[in-house]
Amino acid sequence: MKKVMIITGICGVFLTFAHGRDAPLLRTSQHQPSLEKVAPGTPEIAGKVKELLEIQKKMFDIERNVIQQDQELKQLVEQIRQLQQQLREKIEERLKDNEEYQTMKKRREQIRQEYRNVDFIKQDYWKRRDRR
């Protein structure tokens, strides 16, 4: 028992020193970025997010155009949709007796209906999401 404790202690000390070498040193004298510069609400980050979304939309449009022009890609997209539908059906079948899942599913539908009633989100958005 003593040997185990001694070996454990030695390993602990060794690992502490080994880990300490890789850890960065934190110095209080170093300049810390202000919260304003790293907060997600800042104009700089909002501008980057907007740019990112625009780039993603343009890329998606280009991809969609390429798919529309290529018969092989169209067939792949259709196969993927069919497989996704099969997956969704099998998941629903397996989870039909799961009370937690069914409760959350009902709550999700209630929230969707509330948004539809307020006309906050376009109904076609929800329909598009349900197809997946």
Image (spheres, rainbow, N blue to C red):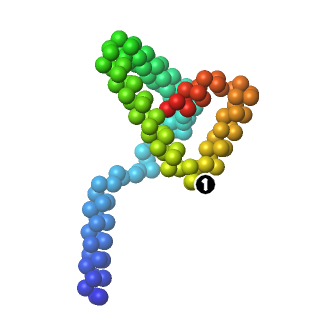
* Camera-side residue of 18 and 47: 47
Q: Is residue 19 left or right of residue 89?
A: left
- Residue 123 is left or right of residue 90, and the answer is right
Look at the picture and state if 31 lies above or below 37: below
In this view, 66 is above or below 107: above
Q: Mark 1 Cα within 10 Å, few/some/many (few <14, many 20+)?
A: few
Q: In this rendering, does residue 105 appear at all?
A: yes
Q: Nearer the viewer, residue 62 or 6?
A: 62
When asked about the image quadrant of residue 31, the answer is: top left
Residue 62 visible at all: no
From the top left corner, tell me how far across and down residue 47 is, in percent: 51, 23
Query: Which residue is at the front of the view, 90 or 127?
Result: 90
Dot 1 lies on which element? helix
**Quadrant location of the N terminus?**
bottom left
Left or right of residue 17, residue 123 in this image: right
Q: Residue at x 65, y 44 (%)?
A: 106
Q: Residue drawn at (28%, 66%), measured in percent from left and top?
A: 15
Residue at 68 percent across and 38 percent down: it is 111
The percent position of residue 110, horizontal first and vertical second, equals 69, 39
Identify the residue at image location x=64%, y=49%. 103
Residue denoted by label 1? 99
Relative image position of residue 10 (x, y in whole percent): 26, 75
- State left or right for residue 90 relative to residue 7: right
* Amino acid of disc 1: Glu
